[in-house]
């Protein structure tokens, strides 16, 4: 007998995913019951359950005990190929009232930070710590480091009132020109676990990056940890 | 630029060959010394070191020099997935000097899968050729890769044995090499099947990639779903205005 290419549950999970898209189901819309789906696809309930399980792990569905399966909130899409989209995304994070600034202070770079940014140890920078919520659940912890010599006299009010792009441009004459990002998977440390309300060692996405201006000067280094289900990265090489 | 790239590649190979096994944090010889050693201009060395730093193979500390980041032995960078010579995950890993072995799990034709038809812009009922593979780097599982290509573009695909032939060489022969990609990256929890192949527990986090490759005429020629072990990969990308 020939080997199966896609198992029945894999096939059904993809078909359900396709229908969610085609029928434009919205966040929190409820799916038909397991029994209905089993009838519709002409398979055992176990197979449907396994297909739904795949979609839960993929972050497409959410299961509520005794209530059924619901379409999960859409992931925030970060388009890595469009700097405007990234800056906008970062600004949205900043000015969003769901984002709270926990701390702003001037620090001098540790050895570790100096290594990442390739700036000398001791370089002065503003360290900003923010936490961002998504429907009242913490979704990311965002640290950024603005190199102090490029933004002298910057205050908390500046950051709260203005977007990064316009603050840089209008007040400091800096035009941002490139972002170098990195995405890795990490496990929550004590502080992250506490602030994001997860257990220690919960898997998180670490999304860090460097923002340069037209003169190739590093303006900001950001280092975020994000709950994995909340985010996806997208790059399109063609129009 | 092309010349700079090719010199860079040679220097890169040599540096990785020679210093790739160094301990984390070990210092490379100075730029001048490297330039003499490889008989190239100092600017080429500078260019190569900058690129290697971008890739995370080395790191540089101002006024102190260039240091090896040992992590690169285990962690590859999945940024250049659409570069000519870096086709697919396995091509990429190979470029890191890791010996890669691909194991074909299953291959064959699928018809009537509307999900795949959508991804590849096909009409209902048009057949899709599926190739499921696991890549091993240095004998350890690295990624599981499900590739789907439209059969109407590659009608004789089933007569090839992709344990022996590279899929990308085959596609290039047919004049439909994927040139550009639409890529999506997420972190998901592993399902039992993928967990088994990646030798990780169920629910363990993994990178999940969804790639649609288009040829020079912007026609979709492959759709890939792949799961990559997070401990063996990182993803980086530069965006310019």
Image (cartoon, rainbow, N blue to C red):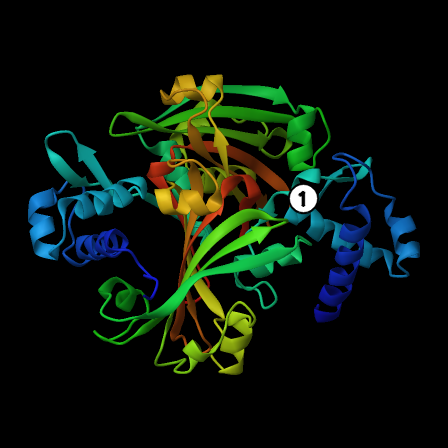
Residue neighbourhood size for the residue with mark 1, other residues' Cα within 10 Å, grouped as few (<14), some (14–19), many (≥20): some
Question: In which chain is the residue bearing label 1?
Answer: B
The quadrant of the picture occupied by the C terminus of chain A is bottom left
A111 w.r.t. A86: above or below: above
Instruction: Kindly give the residue lying farthest to the front in the view shown.
Output: A1
Q: Using the image as rendered, state which of residue A200 and residue B196 is in the foreground.
A: B196
Q: Residue at x 37, y 47 (%)?
A: B193
| Residue A231, image x, y percentages | 36, 41
A48 w.r.t. B9: above or below: above
Q: Residue at x 11, y 50 (%)?
A: A38
**Relative to A63, is B150 on the left or the right?**
right
| Residue B131, image x, y percentages | 42, 65
Q: How many marks?
A: 1
Report helix, strand or loop for mark 1: helix
**Relative to A107, is A74 on the left or the right?**
left
The image quarter containing residue B165 is bottom right
Q: Residue at x 64, y 35 (%)?
A: A116
**Relative to B113, is A176 on the left or the right?**
right
Q: Using the image as rendered, state which of residue B22 and residue B141 is in the foreground.
A: B141
Query: Label 1 belongs to which residue?
Result: B73
The image quarter containing residue A145 is top right
**Relative to A135, is A159 on the left or the right?**
right
| Residue B12, image x, y percentages | 75, 56
Q: Residue at x 82, y 38 (%)?
A: B27
The quadrant of the picture occupied by the N terminus of chain A is bottom left
| Residue A96, image x, y percentages | 32, 32
Camera sees residue A7: yes
Camera sees residue A210: no
């Amino acid at each position: 007998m020939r080997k199966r290419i896609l198992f029945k549950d894999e096939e059904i999970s993809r078909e359900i995913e396709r229908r969610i898209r085609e029928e434009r189901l919205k966040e929190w819309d409820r799916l038909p019951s397991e029994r209905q789906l089993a009838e519709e696809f002409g398979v055992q309930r176990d197979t449907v359950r396994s297909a739904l399980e795949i979609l839960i792990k993929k972050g497409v569905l959410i299961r509520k005990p005794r209530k059924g399966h619901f379409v999960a909130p859409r992931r925030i899409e970060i388009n890595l190929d469009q700097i405007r989209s990234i800056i906008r995304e970062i600004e949205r994070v900043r000015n969003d009232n769901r984002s709270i600034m926990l701390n702003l202070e001037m620090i001098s770079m540790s050895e570790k930070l100096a290594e990442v940014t390739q700036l000398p140890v001791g370089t002065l920078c503003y360290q900003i710590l923010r936490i961002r919520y998504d429907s009242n659940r913490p979704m990311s912890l965002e640290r950024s480091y603005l190199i102090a010599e490029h933004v002298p006299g910057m205050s908390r009010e500046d950051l709260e009132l203005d977007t990064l792009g316009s603050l840089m441009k209008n007040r400091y004459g800096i035009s941002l020109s490139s972002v170098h990002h990195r995405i890795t998977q990490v496990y929550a440390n004590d502080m992250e676990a506490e602030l994001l309300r997860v257990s220690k060692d919960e898997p998180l996405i670490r999304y860090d990056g460097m923002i340069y201006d037209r003169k190739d000067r590093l303006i900001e280094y950001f280092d975020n940890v994000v709950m994995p289900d909340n985010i996806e990265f997208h790059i399109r090489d063609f129009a | 630029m092309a010349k700079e790239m090719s010199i860079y590649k040679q220097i890169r190979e040599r540096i990785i060959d020679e210093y790739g096994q160094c301990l984390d944090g070990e210092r490379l010889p100075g730029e001048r010394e490297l330039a003499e050693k490889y008989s190239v201009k100092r600017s080429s060395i500078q260019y190569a070191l900058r690129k290697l730093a971008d890739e995370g193979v080395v790191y540089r500390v101002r006024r102190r020099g260039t240091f090896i980041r040992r992590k690169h032995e285990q962690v590859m960078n999945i940024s250049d997935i659409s570069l000519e010579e870096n086709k697919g995950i396995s091509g990429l890993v190979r470029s890191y000097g890791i010996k890669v072995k691909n194991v074909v799990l299953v291959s064959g034709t699928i018809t009537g899968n509307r999900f795949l038809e959508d991804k590849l812009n096909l009409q209902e009922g048009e057949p899709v050729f599926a190739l499921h593979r696991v890549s091993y780097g240095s004998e350890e599982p690295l990624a599981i890769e499900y590739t789907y290509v439209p059969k109407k573009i590659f009608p004789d695909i089933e007569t090839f044995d992709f344990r022996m032939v590279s899929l990308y060489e085959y596609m290039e022969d047919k004049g439909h090499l994927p040139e550009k990609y639409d890529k999506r990256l997420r972190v998901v929890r592993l399902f039992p099947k993928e967990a088994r192949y990646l030798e990780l527990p169920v629910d363990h986090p993994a990178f999940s990639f969804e790639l649609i490759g288009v040829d020079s005429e912007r026609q979709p020629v492959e759709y890939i779903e792949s799961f990559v072990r997070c401990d063996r990969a990182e993803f980086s990308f530069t965006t310019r205005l």
